[in-house]
Amino acid sequence: MKRIRWSVAALLLGLVGCGSIEEEAPADALRTQAATLRSCSSDLNCSSYCQCRSGACVPADVIPGPPPPTIDCDAPPLRTCSTGADCITGCGCQSGVCTRNVPSSNANCLLVPPDAFENDDTHLTASAYGAPQLKHTFHRVGDVDWILVYTPVAQVMTVQAYNVGFYQGLRVELYAYDYNNRTLGARLASGQGPSCDPFYPQCRNVTITGNVAAQGAYVVKVTDLRTLPQGDYDTLTPGNEPRYDLRMY
């Protein structure tokens, strides 16, 4: 009985001789697609509804709200705006996009401007609470907000961060405060969340309670819990940035 041996070279020659290259088309298509992907080092380098993965901009895993008709991750990132207040200093709102309005400015127009309560990054510069504070934002990763409150009567006071942007977590803490000496006292309460699926509106809050004295001074600290690289979050659409409202009662 004859034993037939096929060499690799003969097999390759046979395949080439057949003249068919249809099996190579999918691989070629993938290589072409990969070559057109926008390179990135963080999500800030990608357009809206896109994220940076393995050095390339690709559609985001989670999209807040209804998805847009098209998602173009090859496009450069642009921060949209309706007024100049949506843009940082050195940038203005032109044709619905934050654009440098000073030729010598080196401002990064993709960044979120500080909210109306800044500079409140320490208890020494805490904003004073008098009514619910709306539209707090974490304009950069690692941003911390401090709020000073005076209590006219002794009570169990509730502190609530609500309308929390659903793709983030935050911590709320209540401290006794020596206002005359500007020193922190004991931490009276602490909590973090959201504690349930933040897709549901009723879950987008963090609530703590603490005993406060009449004619007392206290400070609330709100901390961004994200562990992303600096600038690595959605800053491109006003209202999508990490945000919360705050009330005490």
Image (cartoon, rainbow, N blue to C red):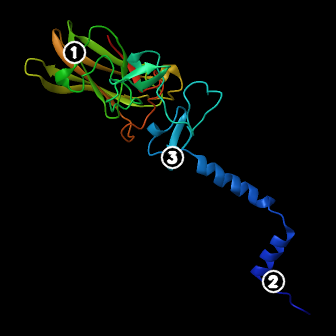
**Eye-nearest disc, 3 or 2:** 3
Circles 1 and 3, Cβ within 8 Å, touching? The answer is no
| Secondary structure of the residue carrying numbered label 1 | strand
What residue is rendered at 60% in x and 47% in y? 36
Residue 6 is labelled as 2
Quadrant in which the N terminus appears: bottom right
Decide if residue 68 is on the left or right side of residue 197.
Answer: right
Residue 212 is labelled as 1
Furthest residue to the right?
1
Q: The disc labelled 1 sits on which kind of residue?
A: Val
Q: Closer to the N terminus: mark 1 or mark 3? A: 3
| Secondary structure of the residue carrying numbered label 3 | loop
| Secondary structure of the residue carrying numbered label 2 | loop
**Eye-nearest disc, 1 or 2:** 2
Q: The disc labelled 3 sits on which kind of residue?
A: Ser
Q: The disc labelled 2 sits on which kind of residue?
A: Trp
* Inter-mark Cα distance, 3 to 2: 45 Å
What residue is rendered at 86% in x and 87% in y? 4
At label 3, counting other C-alpha atoms closer than 10 Å, the crowd grade (few under 14, some 14-19, many 20 or more) is some
Q: Closer to the N terminus: mark 3 or mark 2? A: 2
> Which residue is disc 3 drawn over?
39
Residue 65 is labelled as none
Q: Nearer the viewer, residue 100 or 3?
A: 100
The relative height of residue 106 versus residue 7 in the rendered view (above or below) is above
Decide if residue 216 is on the left or right side of residue 8.
Answer: left
Decide if residue 201 is on the left or right side of residue 24.
Answer: left
